[in-house]
């Protein structure tokens, strides 16, 4: 019998569906230091972002039967893919499931910073009535620069277009011929955009994509949204850019360190923050569950 460990939990229906397919599911969390040894008894491991599937974990599994690691989500930065490959362990993710949810959250942050939704909420709770202070701007008519035109970027592009925004994009893999949006170089995009939304993975060999140099290229009063990975933006440089007025507002779902300890960023009046909840919708979690089940069933031919 195929044994699967769902170390960071999994949607209930997906667990039922795996069991119905004759798979034994252990829906428990095993701590990082004991994980490698425990994995010897499992054919597959399902993780979200909490579990780190490091080389050390995989080395400790040596002699075991692990064949597949499924990341229930998009980013696979918590999995050492090279080490897994060397050990013959296949790594899969669920790239299709949460695009719409992440795109909607990026949009929610855009509205929040453009219209002071978060800070108005917070200050009203303290008895303030800042009607004059919170004069915002409309999204309609503004240029949205999307950095990374994958599934999330495309979903955001469609929604932003419907709102009357002009969408431009840049992508690490070059121009996409099927798209109606203008393709710009990174530098051109920084110069042209009123809003910039990031949808690229973090590349640790290159470091943060957005630092002081990049902020300097942007329009004065730009709005920056990061629902990708925290380290894509240098938080110190972001705070400086907020203080200087270069950045009018920032929507931040992901942080250099999670949970974040960066109070200056979290409490900044022109920042809208959420605790890495891009994929946290019922719909996305259902779809992620379905994709995990189908990935495991296909892999083991069940
Ligand atoms: C993802 O990579 O799927 C999202 O960032 C959500 C997550 O990590 O939980």
Image (tube, rainbow, N blue to C red):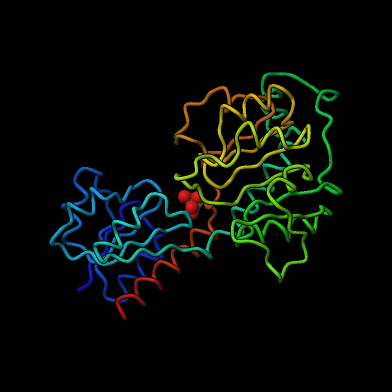
Q: Residue at x 65, y 31 (%)?
A: 271
| Residue lying furthest top | 127
Name the foreground residue: 4 vs 139. 139
Residue 156 rendering spot, x and y as whole percentages: 68, 56
Residue 90 in the image: state x and y as whole percent. Answer: 32, 66
Query: Percent position (x, y) of residue 254?
Result: 53, 40
Picture residue at 61% right of the left edge, 58% below the top:
152
- In the image, 1 versus 241, the foreground residue is 241
- The residue located at (22%, 49%) in the rendering is 35
Q: Quadrant of residue 101?
A: bottom right
Q: Is 73 left or right of 165, judged from the image as shown?
A: left
Judging depth in this view, the residue of 41 and 83 nearest the camera is 83
Which image quadrant: the C terminus? bottom left
Name, please, the residue furthest toward the left: 63
126 w.r.t. 26: above or below: above
Quadrant including the N terminus: bottom left
Give me the residue at 75% from left, 47% from top.
Answer: 188
> Is residue 53 shown above or below 252?
below
In this picture, is 287 found above or below 233? below
> Along the horizontal axis of the image, is 235 left or right of 38?
right
Residue 163 picture quarter: bottom right
| Residue 263 left/right relative to 17 | right
């Amino acid at each position: 019998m195929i044994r699967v460990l769902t170390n960071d939990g999994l949607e209930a229906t997906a667990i039922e569906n795996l069991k119905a397919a004759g798979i034994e599911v252990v829906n428990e969390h095993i701590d990082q230091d004991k994980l490698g040894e425990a994995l010897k008894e499992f054919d597959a491991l399902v993780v979200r972002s909490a579990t780190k599937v490091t080389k050390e974990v995989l080395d400790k599994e040596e002699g075991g039967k692990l064949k597949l690691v499924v990341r229930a989500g998009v980013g696979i930065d918590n999995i050492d893919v090279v080490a897994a490959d060397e050990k013959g362990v296949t790594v899969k993710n669920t790239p299709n499931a949460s695009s719409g949810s992440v795109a909607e959250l990026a949009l929610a942050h855009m509205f929040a910073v453009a219209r002071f939704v978060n800070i108005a909420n917070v200050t009203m709770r303290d008895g303030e009535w800042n009607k004059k202070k919170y004069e915002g701007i409309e999204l309609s008519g503004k240029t949205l620069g999307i950095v990374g035109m994958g599934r999330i970027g495309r979903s955001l592009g469609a929604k932003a277009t419907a709102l009357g925004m002009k969408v431009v994009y840049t992508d690490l893999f070059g121009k996409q011929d099927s798209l109606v949006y203008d393709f710009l170089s990174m530098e051109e995009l920084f110069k042209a955009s009123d809003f910039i939304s990031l949808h690229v993975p973090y590349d640790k060999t290159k470091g943060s994509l957005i630092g002081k140099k990049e902020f300097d290229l942007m329009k004065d009063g730009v709005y920056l949204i990061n629902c990708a990975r925290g380290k894509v933006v240098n938080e110190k440089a972001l705070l400086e850019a907020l203080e200087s007025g270069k950045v009018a507002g920032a929507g931040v779902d992901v942080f250099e360190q999670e949970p974040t300890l960066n109070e200056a960023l979290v409490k900044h009046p022109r920042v809208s923050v959420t605790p890495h909840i891009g994929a946290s919708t019922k719909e996305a979690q259902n779809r992620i569950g379905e994709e995990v089940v189908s990935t495991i069933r296909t892999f083991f031919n069940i």
